[in-house]
Amino acid sequence: MGNFSQLVYLVPLFPLIGFLINGLLWNKMPKSLAGIIGSAAILASFCVSMGIFFEVKSASFHEPVIVNLFDFIQSGKLHIPLAFQVDQLSSLFLLIITGVGFLIHVYSASYMSHDEGMVKYFAYLNLFVFSMLLLILGANYLVMFIGWEGVGLCSYLLIGFWFKKREYTNAAKKAFVMNRIGDLGFLVGMLLVLYNFGTLSYKEFFTTLSATGASMPPATITAITICFFIGATGKSAQIPLYTWLPDAMAGPTPVSALIHAATMVTAGIYMIARSHVLYSLAPFTLNIVAIVGLATALLAASIAIRQNDIKKVLAYSTVSQLGFMFLALGVGAYTTAVFHVMTHAFFKALMFLGSGSVIHAMGGEQDIRKMGGLGKKMKITSVTFLIGCLAISGFPLLSGFFSKDAILTAAFAHNPVLFGLGVLAAMMTAFYMFRLYFLTFTGTFRGTHDQEHHLHESPIAMTGPLMILAILSIIGGYVGLPEVMSEHNLFNEYLAPVVKNFGEHHLSAATEWMLMGISTGASLIMIGFAYSATKSAAFPESTGIAKVLENKWYVDELYDTIIVRPIEALSGVLDRFVEKMGIDGIVNGVGKTVKWGGDRLRMLQTGQVGFYIFIMVIGMLALFTLSFFWIK
C-alpha cells in the first residue's frame, strides 16, 4: 500500500489553508497574491489527488482505505468519526473537482482582476472547494452532510457576491432556501438510516444492507431512498427544486462554471451513486428517479430553446444534463451517470468560461441578440466554444457522444419509451446549443459601435483553461467506449470494485449501432435546423408556445402564486394576531398588570401613624377570626 491514501487529509486541507489566509487578510492582501494563493492551494490538492488516483488504479489496491482523523461524535453505542474514505469513486471525483477547479481558479485570477472584492472572492472559492472535497471524501453520511451544507453556504456567498444589486442577493437567498428544503429530506433520510441500522458509516451500513437487505421492510428502504432523493433534487436541481439554478447566474461567471460543471450540482448524483446498494433494493424509488430525471431533462431543454441570455441558456442546459444523469441512475446505470458527470464537467466548464470570455469582450453584455460575428475577433474562444457545443450535442467521437449514448442505450434496455423521450431531449440540446453558437459567433455584429470597437480576444490566463478543457472535451470519452467499439470499458472497470450497475441488459451489436445512429442523426438534423433558424437573425415578438418557453413555463410565477404569496399572507396574519396581539399582548399585559397593581398598593403608604395603627388592628382582627373559625 502506497502512502498517498494516508495523505488524503491534505486534499481538503490545502483549500482550507488558502481560505484562511485570504479570508483573514482580505483587507491587506494584494489582489494578484490572493489569486496565486487560491490557485496554488487547489493545484497542491490536484497533485495529491493524482497520486491517490494512480495508487488506487494500481494492482496492489484492493479494499477502500478509511483514514480516521478524530472521533467526531461518541455517545453510548453511537460512534461517528471524522473519517475519509479513499476508493475508486472518491478518487475519480477528487480529480474532477481539483482539476477543473484549478482551471477555474486560474481563469478567475484574470477575470476578476479589476474587482475590488477579489481577495474575498478567492477565499469563498477555496472554501467552496474545501466543502465539496469534504462531501466527496467523507466515510460516513454525517461528514458528507457537513460538506453538503458547506457548498450550500458557499453558493449563497458566491451567487450574491455582487451584493449591491438587489436581484443578486434575492437569487442567492433563493438558492439557499431551496437547498435547505432538499437538505431537510437528506437529514430525515440520515436519521432513518441511524434509527434502523445504528450507523452512518458507508462500510458498516452497506455491509449490513447486503446481509439483511432482503429481510428489511420494503417501506423502510423506500422511505430512506426517497428522502435521500429529495436531498438530491435540491442540490442537483431537479423538478420541483430546480428554479434556483438558472437564477444562480447572478454570480461571477467562473462561479457559474464551478457550481454548474464540476462541483455542487453533481453532489446529488455522487450521493446516489455512493448509495447504489441501497437504491438497488428500492425499484419503486429508481422509477421515480428515472421519471423525474427525464421530465427535468425535457422541461429544461424546452426552456433553453427560447432564452436569450447566454448564461441562462447554459444554466437550463445544465439542469437538462443533470436530468440525463438522473435518468441513468433511475435505470440502474450508476457508472454511466458518473461517466456523464465527468464529460459534462469538461464541456460545461468550457462553455461557461467561454461565455465569460464573450461577456468580458462585450463589456458585460449577456444578450445574444446583441452579439454576432464574434468568431472573427475571438478565434480561440470561438473554436473552443464550438468544441463544447459539439460535445454536448453528442457529435460522434467527442466525449459527450460516448456518455450520452451510454445513457440512451441503458434507457432503451430498460424501456424504449424512455429512450424515445431521451432522444427528444438530446435533439433539443443540439438545437439550443447551436442556436446560441450561431447567434453569438457567426453572422454580422448586432451590438453598438462602441462594443464593436472594444472586441478583443481574452488574455492567455483565460484562453489557456479554455484550450485545456477543449482537449479534455475531445478525448475525455475514450475511457468509456461502448461494447460495440471495445471489449474493455476502462471507466466501468475502474469503478467496478465500488459501484456496480443494477439490472443491466446486454443489447446486440446491431441494436447498439442503430441506437447510436438514431441519436446522432437526430442531433445533426437539429444542428441544421438551428443554422436555418438563426440565418435571418430576426427577433420578432414571441407569441403562443414561444412566449410560454421564453417565460420558463411560468413556473416561478406558479411557485409565487401557490407557495410564496400564501405564506407571506399567512405570516402577515400571524404577525398581526398571534405575534402582536397574542404573544406581545400577553407579555405587555403582564407588565401593565404589575404596574397597575403597584400604583394601587403605593396608595397605602400615606405616612399617617393613625392610619397605620388602624390597619394593624384590622389585620389582628382578621388573623383572630381566621384562627377561630379555620384552625381546629
Image: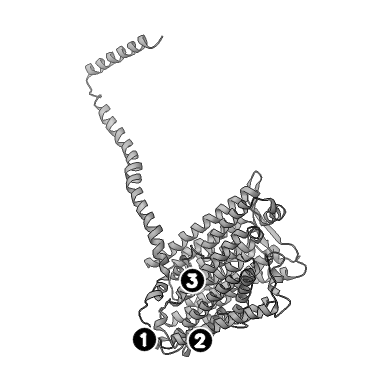
Q: Foreground residue, 474 or 99?
A: 474
Give how far apart the Cα atoms at labels 1 and 2 are. 33 Å
Closer to us: mark 1 or mark 3?
A: 3
Which coloring applies here?
Answer: one colour
Can residue 568 be seen? yes
- Residue designated by label 2: 528
State the residue at coordinates (66%, 78%).
512
Q: Earlier in the sequence, mark 1 or mark 2?
A: 1
Q: Foreground residue, 332 or 164?
A: 332
Q: Foreground residue, 346 or 313?
A: 313
Q: Amino acid at mark 1?
A: Asp
Q: Position of residue 238 (x, y in %)?
A: 51, 65
- Residue designated by label 3: 300
Give how far apart the Cα atoms at labels 1 and 3 are. 35 Å
Q: Amino acid at mark 2?
A: Gly
Q: Earlier in the sequence, mark 1 or mark 3?
A: 3
